[in-house]
Amino acid sequence: MNKLYKILAISFAVLTVIYASTELQYFTGKNETDSILLEWKTGLEHNLNRFEIERSASEPNNFVNIGSLNAIGNNSYYYFRDQLSLQNSANVYYYRLKLVEHNGSYVYSQTITVTHVISSVRDTWGSIKAIFR
């Protein structure tokens, strides 16, 4: 007796967005204890010089440059750790990448939002340290 089995095939597609001549496969951020970890991956990096990382605290329209990473080449993984200080009272951060080409032209990635939650232990320790300053 032959049995017929149905196989369900599921495939996940990576969303690739093309900025100028660079393919950005993803750009994400996640909350960590004392920082926010930003990660992104590229496909094609034609004529790309560097990524400038920009952050805006509490509102999405006031971006400042917080760092820069040189482009490595096609199909590369990048990460940047944004070390946050206890003095910064914001808990919502907006991030975007500025993709700068060798000729100086640039485009911005989409903006992502990351909520930063400080652990109660870290928050209490920060308050105790502030008393003794």
Image (cartoon, rainbow, N blue to C red):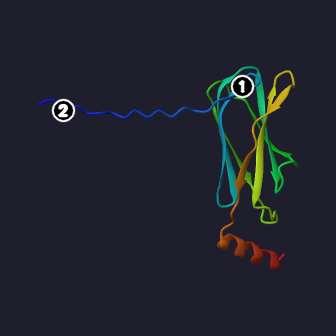
Estimate the spatial distance between the alpha carbons at disc 1 and disc 2, rounded to whole Å.
49 Å
Q: In this view, does 102 lie above or below 13?
A: above
Depth check: give the residue in front, 38 or 18.
18
Residue 93 picture location, percent across and down: 77, 54
Q: Is residue 11 left or right of residue 8?
A: right
Residue 82 picture location, percent across and down: 74, 51
Using the image, tell me which numbered label, if any, was put on residue 58: none
The residue at the point 61 percent across, 27 percent down is 75
What SS does tag 1 mark? Answer: strand
What residue does disc 1 label? 22
Q: In which quarter of the image is residue 25?
A: top right
Of mark 1 and mark 2, the one earlier in the sequence is 2
The residue at the point 82 percent across, 22 percent down is 102
The total number of labels drawn is 2
Residue 118 picture location, percent across and down: 69, 66
Amino acid identity at mark 2: Lys
Amino acid identity at mark 1: Thr
Q: Is residue 34 left or right of residue 58?
A: left
Using the image, tell me which numbered label, if any, was put on residue 3: 2
The residue at the point 61 percent across, 33 percent down is 15
